[in-house]
Amino acid sequence: MYKIEVSKLLEDFEKKFQHFNLSEKEKWQLCLYFPSHLLFVDIETEGLSKERNDITLIGIYKENKYYPFIKDFNLEKALKFLSSTPIWITFGGENFDIPFIKKTFPYLRTPLVHIDLFFLTKEVGLRGGLKKIEKMLGIVRKTEGLNGYDAVKLWKKWVEERDKNSLRKLILYNKEDVVNIKKVMDYVITKLLNKEGRRYEEIFLEFL
């Protein structure tokens, strides 16, 4: 029954999306009309090669809640969110998160729409990686100073030494990544609306 409901949800969304006929640079407008269909996602991995390295953690932020899915614990349960949410928002996911996820779950139909903030931020004059942009926007982290390489080392320490503090720190690092993607997205949408001299209500009415 659940699979039928998900399939219908995706089909209905696909029909509406095609009707809107949005260009690549206009896809962000879907965030205003389909807030419940948004999923912010960020992954941690054993390394940079999707052929040789596995995902260690998938962090999902949906409707203001964070969900961590961890290798050898509950990673497969991420599918419930990934397979039923048509719009994914990442930072740099086009070349990293999405290929890793598709390799891990090859039969995944979603995302039907992928918004990569690495490219969209440039539309409002923000350039650089996620952490650089966070600093530009005044976003503060508890895991300040940690990077992707540190995340690999934290996972290794957890696997080899069963160091719970390393796992906790990895989860917090991932949580801040994915929650901050949402914060950056909110900023970008506000800037794009101002740039076009439009209000949320005007775009919303276009979709009705």
Image (spheres, helix red, strand yellow):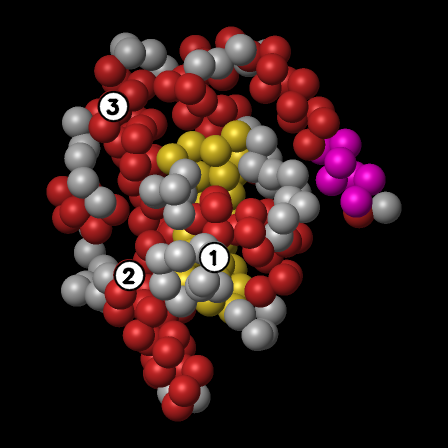
**SS category of the residue bearing label 2:** helix
Q: Which residue is mark 2?
A: 148
In this rendering, would 14 be left or right of 39? right
Q: Residues within 10 Å of mark 2 (few under 14, many from 20)?
A: some
- Give residue 94's position: percent from left, percent from top: 41, 38
Relative depth, front residue between 151 and 102:
102
Q: Position of residue 188 (x, y in %)?
A: 29, 30
Which disc, if any, is residue 51? Answer: 1
Residue 123 numbered mark, or none: 3
- Percent position of residue 181, x then y: 34, 45
- Does residue 57 appear in the picture of this structure? no
Mark 3 / mark 2, whichever is N-terminal: 3
Which mark's residue is nearer the viewer, 1 or 3? 1
The answer to whether residue 159 is above or below residue 183 is below
Identify the mark nearer the N-term, 2 or 1. 1
Q: How far is mark 3 from mark 2, CA to CA? A: 25 Å
Q: Quadrant of residue 78?
A: bottom right
